[in-house]
Amino acid sequence: MFEIEKVDMEHIDRIRPLWEKLIQANAANSPYFADYYGTFEFEIRKGFLQEKLDNGAAMYTAVLVDREKKQDAGFVTVTYNRDTSFGEIEMLYLLEEYRGQGMGKKLFKMALSCLDINCIRDRKLCVTYGNEAALRLYESFGFYPFTIDCLQKRS
């Protein structure tokens, strides 16, 4: 049995283990910057989220909980600003053992519902170059590549 639990900024550390797996997965998918992902730190990511909140954004984080296994199976985090009608799906991750069962779609739909309820018109997400499975999921909901950011790889 699965349940969804909402997590606020005060309790955001709960997603840290899943976030770390997300970063590992991004590194595995990235053909050019696997080593760069190794420099990412949760505290810095948390600071970016707090900065958005301090600048007027709101945040929604939902954790998918597997009650039978007594573990968090995945999460999604969305930030949005009603004044600008802009929202961003910041992070979405699902443990590998739960993929292919519609759980990723469920989390994604929750993110979109949050944006719908708050009348957010402009929506964005970022996906690691090389993560084709995620890109297919996002395209099934009408999200398509708009620009590609390139970083210079330096030794």
Image (cartoon, grey):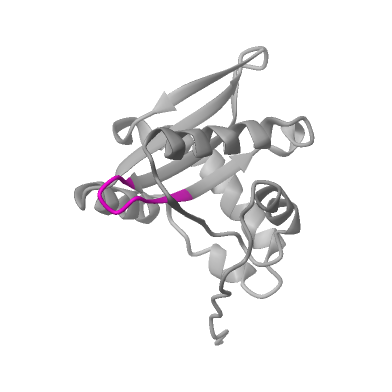
Which quadrant of the rendered structure holds the N terminus?
top right
Image quarter hosting the C terminus: bottom right
Q: Residue 134 vs residue 65: left or right?
A: right
In the image, 26 versus 131, the foreground residue is 131
Image coordinates for residue 127, horizontal then vertical, percent: 60, 59
Question: Residue 124: horizontal and vertical position, in percent?
Answer: 49, 56
Counting from the top left corner in percent of width and height, residue 146 is at 57, 69
Q: Is residue 119 left or right of residue 64?
A: left
| Above or below, comparing residue 116 to residue 53 in the picture | above
Q: Is residue 34 above or below residue 22?
A: below
Residue 61 shown left or right of residue 129 in the figure: left
Whether 82 is among the magenta residues is yes
Residue 85 falls inside the magenta stretch: yes
In the image, residue 93 above or below residue 62: below
x 47%, y 36%: residue: 15
Which residue is farthest right?
Answer: 100
The answer to which of 6 and 119 lies nearer the viewer is: 119
User: Horizontal placement of 68 versus 87: left or right?
Assistant: right
2 over 90 or under it: above or below = above
Count of numbered tags: 0
Q: Nearer the viewer, residue 60 or 87?
A: 87
Q: Residue at x 36, y 56 (%)?
A: 44
Magenta residue span = 81-89
User: What's the residue at 73%, 31% (across, down)?
Assistant: 102
Residue plotted at (67% across, 17% down): 69
